[in-house]
Image (tube, rainbow, N blue to C red):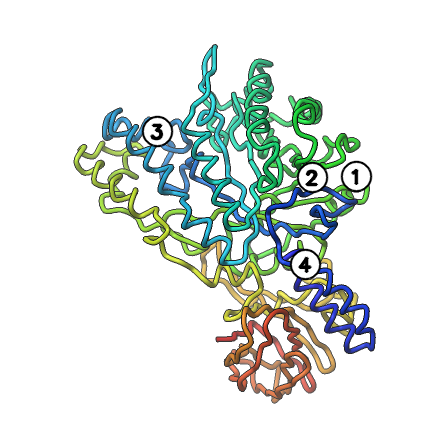
């Protein structure tokens, strides 16, 4: 759906309660199904379609396909980037078998079934990470690699069929833009900025894509360069003054061929240093940052600096990558972005032996031996390796992968699922929460807001920690939950009181259920059946007597 549909429906609900139903109904009337058959362009800080309707890009990154990444194969240093993984495969099964493997890998890893499923789950766009070597050879006289263009054409055709937009992502530019493994660097140097010929080759490749898709609205736009020039290696300090001039050069050349598509630009230092941006240099420009919350205990990173730059630049902002954590953070971040009119793309669609992506690839038999070799261990026999790679080609097909609905539901704030109590809405005091002491600030999570959030434990795993909110009598928090259909769910709340008996209510769309808890031990309080409407639902958690800590609410 276009525009932040959940927010518009929530506005309708609030308007109906305040007697402003006509305004709410007008807003809802502007929402229509998204069709990736219209060119997107910018209007102020929004992305809009040809009809002027605001489009919230909610996408998924297609990593590890054109550009295999070592961590997604669970490899070590010997296989930490595409060229090393390719060499490892060749070492293990020989060049001819390796060539056959890679052709089949690119056919199987992302196929039509993947795009159909992505659309079914509610995403409206994909961001494929592209490696220049799959389209243009290296060396003195680069030539086109036909297979890369053919595979990308198939992706665009499937996306057109299923109503998805495509953002072309230059993830590994000629020479490399980071000097790290993620851009397939040959010498661990950002050679894109060290050798002008690499910038010429980057321009050549972009123009090949642009000429191919200039009349195709399914392609939403061109992401010129992924995560350039990290600061920790010194690359940003040396070369970031070249970044915006390079973007300007690429954009001028693209606009000589294509005046309609969006152009996405990323800051230095993994996309997040926007000091490189002066003034907008194109009418259809979208500024991009990437957002990963890897702190322990959990911390929801602030985005105020990007909002300030959006006011300065007066162009849309998009999160090209977010993910690689857990459902608590997934729920919080996408809600945070959309409350601030920012779209997002989850990274990645699938990888091997994981529980924090929509799909997980099963590890093939014999893979431990292949992994060990990638980490400097003994070389497995060719038969063992060939069997493992043959099985991998089957395991990467979507129908053979493991689906995690909880990940998708967290991204879209859907039931069934679990809502962490600290993931109340982002509309502020008297809209998403009410507390009496507004001077309080949490130590870890949402540290700029006054809702008391406390750390309640960790299991010792750096990827998991638990936090809870604490509310006194008269205080409340509110949440927006989506349901694909109208149906009933059984509810539970994990809570405890500071001392003695405490009373609270859980209200869904205005219908309240009373509950109570007694004592300092964590208790799962069972609620009655709650009826969710199709679409947006407003949930309110309010304490009436005593002081209550809430860990989570579950609806199954």
Disc 3/disc 1 C-alpha distance (Å)? 42 Å
Where does label 4 land, which residue? 4
Mark with earlier residue (1, 4): 4
- Asked if the residue at tag 4 contacts the one at tag 3, i.e. Cβ–Cβ closer than 8 Å, the answer is no
Q: Which mark is residue 377?
A: none
Kindly state the secondary structure of the residue where label 4 is placed.
loop
Q: Quadrant of the N terminus?
A: bottom right
| Residue drawn at 59 percent across, 16 percent down | 200
Residue under label 1, please give it.
313
**Badge 3: residue crowd in 10 Å (few <14, some 14–19, many ≥20):** some
Residue mark closest to the camera, 3 vs 4 = 4
The answer to whether residue 250 is visible is yes
Q: Spatial distance from mark 3 to mark 2, Cα to Cα?
A: 33 Å
Q: In terms of sequence position, does the residue under pointer 3 or pointer 1 come before the other?
A: 3
160 to 208, vertically: above or below:
below
Q: Position of residue 174 (x, y in %)?
A: 52, 22
């Amino acid at each position: 759906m276009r525009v932040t549909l959940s927010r518009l429906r929530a506005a309708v609900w609030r308007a109906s309660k305040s007697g402003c139903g006509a305004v709410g109904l007008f807003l809802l009337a502007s929402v229509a199904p998204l069709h990736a058959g219209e060119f997107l362009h910018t209007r102020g800080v929004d992305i809009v379609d040809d009809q002027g309707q605001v489009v919230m890009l909610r996408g998924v990154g297609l990593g590890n396909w054109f550009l295999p990444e070592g961590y997604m194969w669970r490899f070590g240093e010997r296989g930490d980037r595409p060229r090393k993984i390719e060499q490892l495969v060749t070492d293990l099964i020989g060049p001819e078998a390796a060539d056959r493997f890679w052709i089949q890998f690119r056919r199987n890893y992302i196929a039509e079934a993947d795009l159909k499923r992505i659309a079914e789950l509610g995403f409206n766009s994909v961001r494929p990470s592209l490696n220049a070597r799959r389209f243009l050879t290296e060396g003195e006289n680069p030539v086109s690699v036909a297979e890369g263009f053919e595979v990308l054409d198939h992706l665009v055709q499937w996306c057109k069929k299923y109503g998805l937009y495509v953002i072309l992502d230059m993830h590994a530019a000629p020479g490399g833009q980071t000097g790290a493994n993620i851009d397939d660097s040959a010498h661990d140097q950002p050679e894109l900025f060290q050798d002008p010929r690499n910038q010429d080759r980057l321009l050549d490749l972009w123009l090949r894509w642009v000429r191919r898709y200039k009349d195709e609205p399914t392609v939403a736009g061109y992401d010129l360069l992924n995560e350039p020039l990290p600061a920790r290696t010194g690359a940003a300090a040396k070369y970031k003054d070249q970044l915006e001039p390079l973007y300007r050069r690429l954009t001028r050349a693209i606009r000589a061929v294509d005046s309609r598509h969006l152009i996405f630009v990323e800051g230095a230092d993994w996309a997040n240093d926007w000091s490189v941006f002066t003034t907008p240099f194109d009418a259809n420009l979208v500024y991009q940052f990437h957002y990963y919350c890897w702190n322990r205990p959990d911390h929801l990173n602030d985005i105020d600096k990007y909002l300030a730059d959006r006011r300065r630049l007066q162009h849309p902002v998009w999160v090209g990558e977010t993910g690689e954590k857990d459902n608590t953070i997934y729920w919080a971040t996408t809600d945070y972005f959309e409350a601030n009119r920012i779209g997002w793309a989850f990274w990645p669609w699938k990888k091997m032996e994981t529980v924090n992506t929509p799909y997980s690839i099963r590890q093939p038999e014999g893979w431990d031996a292949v992994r060990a070799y990638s980490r400097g261990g003994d070389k497995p026999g060719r038969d063992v390796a060939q069997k493992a790679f043959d099985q991998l080609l089957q395991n990467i097909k979507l129908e053979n992968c493991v689906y995690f609905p909880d990940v998708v539901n967290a991204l879209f704030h859907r039931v069934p699922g679990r809502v962490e109590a600290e993931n109340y809405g982002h509309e502020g005091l008297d809209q998403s929460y009410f507390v009496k002491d507004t001077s309080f600030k949490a130590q870890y999570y949402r540290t700029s807001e006054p809702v008391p959030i406390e750390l309640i434990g960790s299991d010792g795993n750096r990827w998991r920690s638990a936090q809870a909110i604490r509310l006194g009598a008269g205080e409340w928090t509110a949440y927006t939950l989506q349901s694909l259909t109208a149906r009933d769910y059984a509810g539970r709340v994990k809570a405890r009181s500071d001392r003695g008996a405490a009373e609270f209510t859980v209200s869904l769309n205005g219908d309240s259920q009373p509950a109570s808890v007694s004592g300092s031990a964590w208790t799962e309080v069972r609620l009655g059946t709650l009826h969710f409407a199709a679409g947006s639902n407003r949930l309110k958690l309010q304490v009436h007597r005593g002081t209550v800590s809430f860990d989570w609410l579950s609806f199954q």
